[in-house]
Amino acid sequence: MLDLSTISVVDNHCHPIFQNQRMDTLQFRACFVEGNGPSFPERHLSNSVYYLWFLRQVAAFYGCEPTEDAVLATRNSMSTDALLERLFPPANIDTLVIDTGYPPSEECYPLERMGELGYCRVAKLLRLESLMQQLIVAYGDFDEVVERFSAEVSNVREHGYCGLKSIVAYRTGLNVSQWSKDQAAASFAVARAKAVQDGKLRIAHKPLLDYLLHIAFSKAAEQGLPVQFHTGYGDSDTDMRLGNPLNLRDVLERNDYQTMQVVLLHESYPYCQLGAYLANIYPHVYFDLSYTIPFVEKLEMLAFTRQAISVAPASKLMYSSDSVRVPEMHWVGALRGRSVIAQVLDEMIDADVIDKEQAVHIAQQVLHDTAYAVYRL
Ligand SMILES: [Zn+2]
């Protein structure tokens, strides 16, 4: 088996962890569930192969019994600092590219400290829908919101971000359309009324959301900036039909957007072949291979990794964990990403498709180099 442990990973899509890592069983299980309702953590998670595998890995690493209770007791006996100090260095992480849009910042452990204790760099992404929501809650005038939004997405690197992130897939869909200013303003009036009434907003107002996204896309193109799109599975409020990356066609075809790098997150699962194919035909499209979330087991990971490496150039593929809430995910994602990619490359060596030197180069690109170039780390 190829040994990829010396390749440090750029985790091109992950999230902060909770400040407070002391959890009871249901709180811990909830970190591993995307499905709605209490029945998943209570009754179904312990029958999910990915969770059983996860518990075995963590138990072996902590040196405790391979049971949920023992894992919880062990991690609850450690501070958050101690967990990070133990887990992150052996994961050999070069950079964490963090979407700060979730969990809410007041619940999160400080990002800089994650970097310090993990001996890794931390780079941030600006989540577009969060910015939109803040502005719509704060300002009652449509033109003012548009102006402030444009300003925020104009000098993104100067503001400390290495790219943008959109969750439009699970709000109004990836079929981002063209709307007139009047249509967007009418949509704004509805959103703003809701924001005033509730003191907060969950933006799902299509003409307004699409209109603001097009502003962000043209600014991203001007700056040569990557924009991550949630695609496929990964959140329970998604309409999976609209998370198919083929819905992005109108955006991908736009001549004036060709200098914005589009990153399709979560291997577009289960639209993996389609996403990899887009990365193979559009020069500015990249494909993210995520090894903790979506919550699928190794045979599925082998399948999407085979598809991606068989379809798209390695210079279009990049590793992530999509880890969130608990640091074991960032650790286990790096281990599993390396082992799945190694297994697929081994198959390709055995089949005399590539040689060992080429395999190591491909792994280096997927785990590190592609993201390094795209996010200009
Ligand atoms: Zn994510």
Image: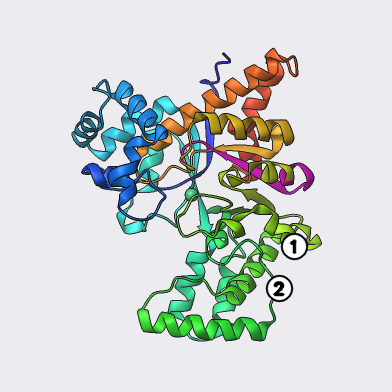
Disc 2 marks which residue?
178
- The structure residue drawn at horizontal position 32% and vertical position 37%, both measured from the top left corner, is 46
Label 2 sits on a secondary structure element that is loop
Distance from label 1 to label 2 (Cα)? 9 Å
Name the spot of residue 182 as percent of width and height, x first: 65, 86
Q: Which mark is residue 301?
A: none
- Write down the region rendered in magenta: 278-293
Tell me which residue sits at (26%, 33%) in the image.
82
Which callout, 1 or 2, points at the residue further toward the start of the chain?
Answer: 2
Q: Nearer the viewer, residue 15 or 29?
A: 29
View extreme (right): residue: 255
Q: Nearer the viewer, residue 366 or 311?
A: 311
Q: Report the front residue among 201 and 219.
A: 201
Drawn side of residue 83 relative to residue 238, left or right: left
Question: For residue 343, which quarter of the picture?
Answer: top right
Residue 115 percent across, percent down from the top left: 41, 39
Magenta segment: does it hold 211?
no
Task: Give the residue at mark 1.
Answer: 250
Residue count near mark 1 (Cα–Cα under 10 Å), binned few <14, some 14–19, many ≥20: few
> Ligand 1 closer than 8 Å to the CB at disc 2?
no
Residue 365, by quadrant, is top right
